[in-house]
Image (cartoon, rainbow, N blue to C red):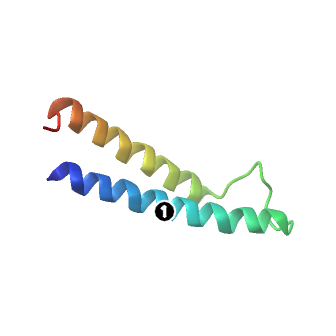
Amino acid sequence: MFDAIMQGEVAELEELVASTEKRWLRRCERGIDAVDRPPESLVRMRGRVLEARALLDALRARFPPE
């Protein structure tokens, strides 16, 4: 059950990151932002996705799905 919740959380975070990246890249195209300097909020969200994936992997290693 917790596995399914974590999968949903990861998917939700990934959608949020994708949306934020899309907006940021549009701003880069208009010259508002630089491609080599993503916003701090995007960097943090990417970190949350990695953390959630790591938690899910650890959960599955400890309690393999049946």
Crowding near the residue tagged with mark 1, few <14, some 14–19, many ≥20 C-alpha atoms within 10 Å: few
SS of the residue under disc 1: helix
The residue where tag 1 is placed is: 15
How many badges with numbers are in the image?
1
Residue 27 vs 34, above or below: the answer is below
In the rendered image, residue 31, in percent from the top left (x then y), is placed at 86, 65
Quadrant housing residue 39 = bottom right
**3 with respect to 10 (left or right):** left
Residue drawn at x 73%, y 51% as measured from the top left: 37
Image quarter for residue 13? Answer: bottom left
Q: Is residue 54 above or below residue 30?
A: above
Where does residue 21 sit, x and y in percent of width and height?
A: 63, 60
Left/right placement of residue 5 relative to residue 39 reads left
| x and y, in percent, of residue 5 in the image | 23, 57
Residue sitting at the far right: 31
User: In the shown orientation, is residue 25 left or right of residue 66?
Assistant: right
Q: Residue furthest front?
A: 66
Is 50 above or below relative to 45?
above
Residue 18 occupies quadrant: bottom right
Q: Amino acid at mark 1?
A: Glu
User: Is 50 left or right of 35, judged from the image as shown?
Assistant: left
Front residue (pair 48, 64): 64
Residue at image location 83% in from the left, 64% down from the top: 29
Relative image position of residue 19 (x, y in whole percent): 57, 66
Seen at 14% across and 53% down, the residue is: 1
